[in-house]
Image (spheres, helix red, strand yellow):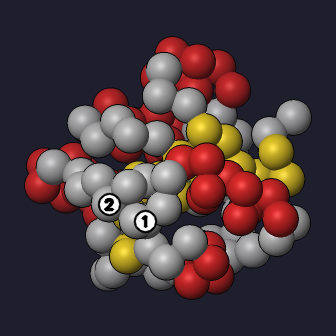
């Protein structure tokens, strides 16, 4: 699944529209503890989190994730969003809960992180 397809699936708005949405999503993950995500993050991951500060972008870039997904219409701060744009990291916001987002990803073939 590509980031653009995930946007449609979870009714998401891409908060980084200048970035290409063709990155391939290889797995999904939901966690808000950054140290845990740093230890378990993977290339191509779609990471669902309620965290919106600058360190979220750094962790996602470090792990070469496909995108950051913010549930429940959460918006990322302007400074963090600018950093995401600068680093080429897509940030999506969805009106769905984290539970619903992960359920839809799994139902459409996005693997859980192993």
Residue 69 image offset from top left, x and y in percent: 47, 55
Q: Tell me the quadrant of the picture where the C terminus can be found.
A: top right
Which of the 4 image quadrants contains residue 85? bottom left
Q: Tell me the quadrant of the picture where the N terminus can be found.
A: bottom right
Q: Secondary structure at mark 2?
A: loop
| Disc assigned to residue 73 | 2
Q: Secondary structure at mark 1?
A: loop
Image side of residue 16 versus residue 98, left or right: left
Which of the 4 image quadrants contains residue 94? bottom left
The answer, for residue 90, to whether it is visible in the render is no
Residue 78 image offset from top left, x and y in percent: 12, 55
Q: Establish if 80 lies above or below 93.
A: above
Residue that mark 1 sits on:
94
- Asked whether 34 or 73 is in front, the reply is 73
Residue 77 image offset from top left, x and y in percent: 16, 49
The answer, for residue 30, to whether it is visible in the render is yes
Q: Residue at x 69, y 26 (%)?
A: 40
Residue farthest left in this picture: 78
Q: CA distance from mark 2 to mark 1?
A: 5 Å
**Crowd band around label 1 with a 10 angstrom C-alpha radius: few (<14), some (14–19), many (20+):** many
Q: Residue at x 29, y 41 (%)?
A: 52
């Amino acid at each position: 699944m590509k980031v653009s397809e995930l946007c449609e699936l979870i009714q998401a708005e891409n908060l980084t529209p200048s970035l290409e949405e063709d990155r391939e999503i290889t797995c999904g993950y939901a966690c808000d503890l950054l140290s845990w995500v740093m230890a378990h993050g993977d290339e191509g991951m779609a990471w669902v989190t309620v965290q919106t500060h600058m360190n979220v972008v750094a962790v996602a870039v470090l792990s070469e994730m496909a995108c950051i997904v913010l549930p429940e219409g959460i918006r990322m701060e302007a400074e963090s969003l600018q950093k995401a744009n600068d680093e080429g990291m897509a940030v999506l916001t969805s009106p769905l809960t984290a539970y619903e987002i992960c359920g839809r990803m799994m139902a459409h073939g996005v693997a859980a992180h192993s």
